[in-house]
Amino acid sequence: MHKPLISSIIVVALFASAAGLTASDALPQETKQERDQRMAWWRDARFGMFIHWGLYAVPAGTWQGKQIPSIGEWIMNTGKIPVADYEKLAAQFNPVKFNADQWVSIAKRAGMKYIVITSKHHDGFAMFHSKASPYNIYDATPFQRDPLAELAAACKRQGLRLGFYYSQCQDWHHPGAEAIGEHWDKAQDGSFDHYLDTVAIPQVQEILTNYPLSVLWWDTPTGAMTSERAAKLAALLKLRPGLITNDRLGGGFSGDTNTPEQFVPATGYPGRDWETCMTMNDTWGFKSYDHNWKSTETLIRNLADIASKGGNYLLNVGPTSLGEIPPASVERLAAVGRWMNVNGPSIYGTSASPFKKLPWGRATQKPGKLYLHVFAWPAGELLVPGLKNRVTAAYLLADVTKSALPVRASENGAAVKLPAQAPDKIDSVVVLEIEGKADVEPEILSQNKAGVVELPAGEATLHGDSLRCQGDSAGENIGFWTNPKDWASWEFKLESPGTFDVQLTFACEPGSAGSEFDVTLAQEQMPAKGLRPRKRMVVTQPAQKLSGKVESTGGWEKFVAVKLGTITITQNGRHVLSVKPTKMPRGAVMNLKSITLKPAGQ
């Protein structure tokens, strides 16, 4: 993670087909219907197990009596351990307590529908029987078994999908491969193309040919992974029709899924398939002294939060060198499983919430049903803000009798009468059966008591295919702004017109500075009588416009607040503010955290 056998004739044909192509070009084209069919099981699953297991489980975070900082699987890099010294760990790696069926059972009882395990991490050690390199668990250890083949058989027996993680670019053992932070041992030096052609490509061929994979999970591409090199690897995906891949191959290959790591994106990635991968403590690979475990409450609410934004939750375990999943992980997964036994229908096969924000929790939905995940159980009624649909039934998901809960329509939405006690102190699910597709009147941003209008990234409407809201709720910002045709807008309500200073809070690395943009303000006008009330017309004239240029702030996460200019608003009511690039001379526009309209003189 970040600090994030086939015949030679077929191989030649695959390489030839990739020559001169980008990674995306090397893949077969598919229709939307074909993609939806391919992604259907993954979208339904919502919950999977990540497993980081390798030689790094032997030192377990300690080298030569010293605890090495950072995550466990990076110990070779962080500790700058010479190749010859690290590879001696193989003789000590004998996971005699490994039981594939037990691992799969732990995942299945937790409610997980698929497993993704490290077939080769950055240390270059293959956890499967590889003919391409003897540096693997079958040939180099006393274990002399292929645990990934055993895991594949156990997944088949128990009905879980299987995926392999493969570090295609970083490999700290084989000469020529990449190492973030540069090589520290001359034994690592060599040709990247030689590494790619003799290790990475043959091993990817092996895992795609010899194992029944549903997912291939790439990681940590560097600048060495050009589009031509990535195309060689992408061409191999034809060996496993229906395979799902992520966005970390490099070389312009977008893959099928976005992979936010260790955080839940504030608004998800609307219109995209995405998956948050996350540890249970502070490490991916096993560290004997890392006991900073997330609570069961955090794990369950993360799962509900991610599903409410249309994503999957890939939750990690780091087994020991003996092949055991740590007891703390097993206990927490069992607790999540008990919750899922009751509330699984509110997670599996659901789509993102129709509500932008809910003060008491989250929501997921299926056609004709809303699942309200109530974290903060109210006394009396639960207000479902902005819901316009007629509610035909309401009940607790935990109630097998589906005893009706009273519902009344209110000025602000639907109000559901709840029992005095929550059925689950972590997340109680209320089901609303509704007529038609969920129809929710969005809440409109407005001035605070000081007359200030705050327009945060998480409240923006994003227009385009590249930009998206990233970061957690505290640091969310609009990023991946790599297409100058993409833009963002906010709708807000003004009750006290006047003159306002317009302030942008943004970040930009030095190499991407120089983009220019316009900030435009226009007032909304309700449509003429007879038109649908929610179809508003935006009056673009007279519109006010301010222009700016993006300067470097020192990095993508170094945010600064800059006054762009002053505007005067003479009328109250609804307004729309938009930010549109006019010039993007380099790779991206900026990371935009917020826009603030502050009364002049304050």
Image: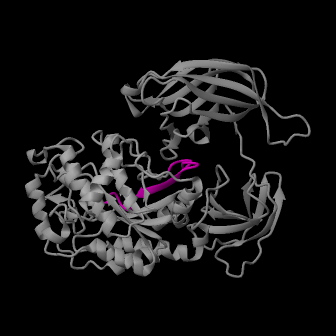
- Give the residue at the far right of this rendering: 529
Residue 548 counted in the magenta span? no
Which residue is at the front of the view, 457 or 209? 209
Direction from residue 238 to residue 93 in the image, left or right: left
Tell me the quarter of the image containing the C terminus. top right
Instruction: Give the residue displayed 56% in from the left and 30% down from the top.
Output: 485
**Residue 8 lies in what quarter of the image?**
bottom left
Direction from residue 520 to residue 297 in the image, left or right: left
In the rendered image, residue 361, in percent from the top left (x then y), is placed at 61, 58
Residue 280 counted in the magenta span? yes
Direction from residue 175 to residue 580 in the image, left or right: right
In the rendered image, residue 61, in percent from the top left (x then y), is placed at 21, 59
Which residue is at the front of the view, 17 or 85? 17
Which residue is at the front of the view, 447 or 409? 409
Instruction: Give the residue displayed 63% in from the left and 25% down from the top.
Output: 598
**Residue 162 lies in what quarter of the image?**
bottom left
Direction from residue 32 to residue 51 in the image, left or right: left
Instruction: Give the residue displayed 56% in from the left and 38% down from the top.
Output: 457
Q: Can residue 2 be seen in this view?
A: no
Q: Is residue 323 visible?
A: yes
In the rendered image, residue 530, in percent from the top left (x then y), is placed at 91, 40
In the rendered image, residue 550, in percent from the top left (x then y), is placed at 47, 23
**Residue 285 lies in what quarter of the image?**
bottom left
Q: What stretch is highlighted in magenta?
A: 265-284
Tell me: residue 260, above or below residue 344: above
Tell me: residue 26, above or below residue 344: above
For the image, the number of numbered tags is 0
Q: Main secondary structure of the magenta part?
A: loop
Instruction: Give the residue displayed 58% in from the left and 38% down from the top.
Output: 464
